Image (cartoon, helix red, strand yellow):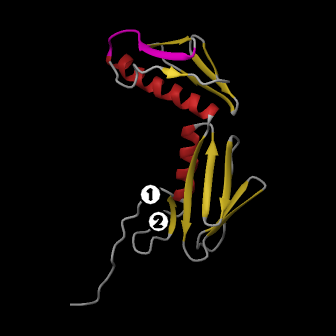
Amino acid sequence: MSRIGKLPIAIPQGVKVTVTEDMITVEGPKGKLEQDYKPGVEIKVEDSEVTVSAKDDTKAAHSYHGLYRSLINNMVVGVSQGFSKGLVINGVGYRAEVKNGILTLNLGYSQPIDYFIEEGITITTEGNKVNVAGIDKQRVGQVSADIRSLRPPEPYKGKGIRYDNENIRRKIGKSGIK
């Protein structure tokens, strides 16, 4: 039995979870999320808890057991609190600004890069920091990874875009001494 899958999910005040035969819907103060699920798991909503269990003793059912428990938990947290990821832009002349749903990044290339902000994602800038927020954990992480991939940090001077909690291993470069 999955150690994560057997834990119940507490439903906070103002969050409503509904389960149909192949769809889970979670509604809360920040929005609404939907997720389809495989028939190998059984999802029950009782009082203020959601429990997930495997229907049979197959390997696939046990793997989906923990997966759907984590997905439902992320949905509940997302519609009640939301998720955010911070990015730090490091480099001379590197900057970012948001205007009319477009994130404009000057990253040392000959032209600025325009990143169109998708619906359900909020991007704010403050100095050299970019904050990506939303209710869907997977989309917030993907948008953050897409922005980071535009100019990943390099190991010699540390220039580029990195996560705010990321540690870049620095290299010393050429010493020139023999």
Q: Quadrant of residue 55?
A: top left
Circle 2 — which element? loop
102 relative position to 161: left or right: right
Residue 165 falls inside the magenta stretch: no
Q: Position of residue 51 (x, y in %)?
A: 48, 15
Q: What separation in Å lies between label 1 and label 2 (alpha carbons)?
A: 10 Å
Residue that carries the numbered disc 2 in the rendered image: 153
Secondary structure at badge 1 equals loop
Examine the rendered structure and indicate whether residue 30 appears above or below residue 98: above
Answer with the quarter of the image where residue 94 lies: bottom right
The residue pinned by badge 1 equals: 166
Side of 112 where 156 appears, left or right: left
Residue 139 vertical placement versus 32 (above, below) = below
Magenta region: 48-58
Residue 28 in percent (x, y) is at: 67, 27
Q: Residue at x 70, y 30 (%)?
A: 29
Looking at the picture, does residue 53 appear above or below residue 94? above
The residue drawn where x is 53% and y is 17% is 49
Q: Nearer the viewer, mark 1 or mark 2?
A: 1
Q: Earlier in the sequence, mark 1 or mark 2?
A: 2
The kind of residue on which mark 1 rests is Glu
- Give the residue furthest to the front: 13
Q: Which label belongs to residue 31? A: none
Instruction: Find out whether the residues at labels 1 and 2 contact each other: C-beta distance under 8 Å.
Output: yes
The residue positioned farthest toward the left in the image shown: 178
Q: Left or right? Give the position of 70 relative to 26.
A: left
Residue 159 visible in this rendered orientation of the protein:
yes
| Residue 31 drawn at (x, y percent) | 69, 31
Q: Residues within 10 Å of mark 2 (few under 14, many from 20)?
A: many
State the image coordinates of residue 175 (x, y, percent, origin top left). Answer: 29, 85
